[in-house]
Image (tube, rainbow, N blue to C red):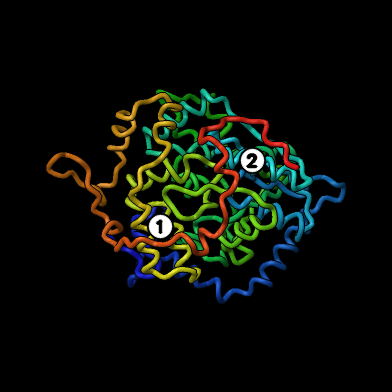
Amino acid sequence: MKICKECLYPENHALKITIQDGVCSGCRIHKEKYDIDWSFKEESLKKTFKKYKSKKGYYDCIIPVTGGGDSFFIVDYVTRILKGNPLLVNYNTHYNSPVGIYNLALLRSKFDNDFLQMTTNPRKVKKITKESLIKFGSIYWHCIAGQTAFPVQIAVKYKIPLIIWGAHQGIDQVGMFSHNDKVEMNEKYRKNHDLMGYDANDLVGEICDQDDLVNYQYPSINDLEKVGVRGIYLNNYMFWDSFKQHADMHKKYKYNFNIQNRTFDKYNYSHCLYYSDVHDYIKFLKHGYSKVNDNVSREIRLKRITKNYGKTLISFYINKKPKFLKQFIDWLGITNESFYFIMENHRSKICWNRNKNWNWDYKGEFLNFENKVFEKNNYYFKYKKNISKKFKKKTIVFEKGFDIK
């Protein structure tokens, strides 16, 4: 398995990275950031947004939000810099962490914007999760599908043509596109990249039927064209640095984070109990790399850490067992044996092989990196303990939230 000699990304990246002369496509496109006139791009964004400004005090755009991710940064930018009046929408993933519930309540209280949330019937969510786990080894398909369908459905229903998203991984991780392509979110991009090639119709089978998947269907072309719906990504218009954005927004709004078990980035999907845990462990089994690789690659490219330190971080985190696997399989209604039996069909044969005792051994490069003990006193660990320590770790499907004062 080839590994990028600059950022340590492997060639079998889930989003199809390419490596030439030892350097990956993600690193090559990342270098564009240092040659682009970002002030010019931001001015073009402002001009574009101005075309969608409501003259009657109605919503100017839709912003999909969570209790983590880049939500605070996007809403802050649109309301403060663009002077917009967005409608905030949220798809309830059912995987909410207590920190995520708190942060979403904080977001609603800090910004004077209307807010809509959609919670799918838990019985349907479990059916869809079982189907996606069996068919293509994913417990997160319904989250991405819901998060990318619900805002578009609302745009059609409320006749709000502009949707503002944060970053698309096609640029930020693997260099699938240039920053100058100005890729926009649409049905084709969503299926091929966000949803790994599977749309709602692909999940119809023995477990799920069409009725279970209504909330995950993308609106028809006719409905989209009537409203003129378009989705733009902010990282086409500004130098994107998700960790710095989180640090700045954390300082400004005092939202909370979780210390993660399988990566060093404490902001990384802190709203979701399973994303950087069970979901990431599945990623490791399927592809032989993990979320810590994503975070290390980003930090190396942004020149905040050295490649050697990145190797230490990967070796330290990549093989850690998930904390919440039992909790997840109990919620889903399957056994531990069933989970691993399903994953046998999706495990990467490039990175795993059976030993003489018929157990799986990892044969990827990352455990061969030197694993030194490192001090957690640098940029990534500098903040004091936070409210997440007060919560019992559990899955929260729905909660009223918190009284934020």
Q: Nearer the viewer, mark 2 or mark 1?
A: 2
Residue under label 1: 293
> In the shown orientation, is residue 27 left or right of residue 338?
right
Q: Which comes sooner in the sequence, label 2 or label 1?
A: 2
Q: Quadrant of the C terminus?
A: top right
Residue 376 in view, yes or no = yes
Q: Estimate the spatial distance between the alpha carbons at disc 2 and disc 1, rounded to whole Å.
A: 28 Å
Q: Which x, y percent locates residue 244?
A: 58, 62
Question: Quick check: 104 above or below 176?
Answer: above
Q: Which mark is residue 387?
A: none
Q: Residue at x 74, y 38 (%)?
A: 158
- What amino acid is at disc 2? Tyr
Crowd rating for badge 2 (residues with CA inside 10 Å; few <14, some 14–19, many 20+): many
Q: Residue at x 57, y 30 (%)?
A: 397
Q: Nearer the viewer, residue 125 or 226?
A: 125
- What amino acid is at disc 1? Asn
Q: Which x, y percent locates residue 52?
A: 77, 53
Q: Which x, y percent locates residue 258?
A: 53, 47
Residue under label 2: 102
Question: Quick check: 34 above or below 48?
Answer: below
Residue 152 in view, yes or no = no
Q: Residue furthest left?
A: 356
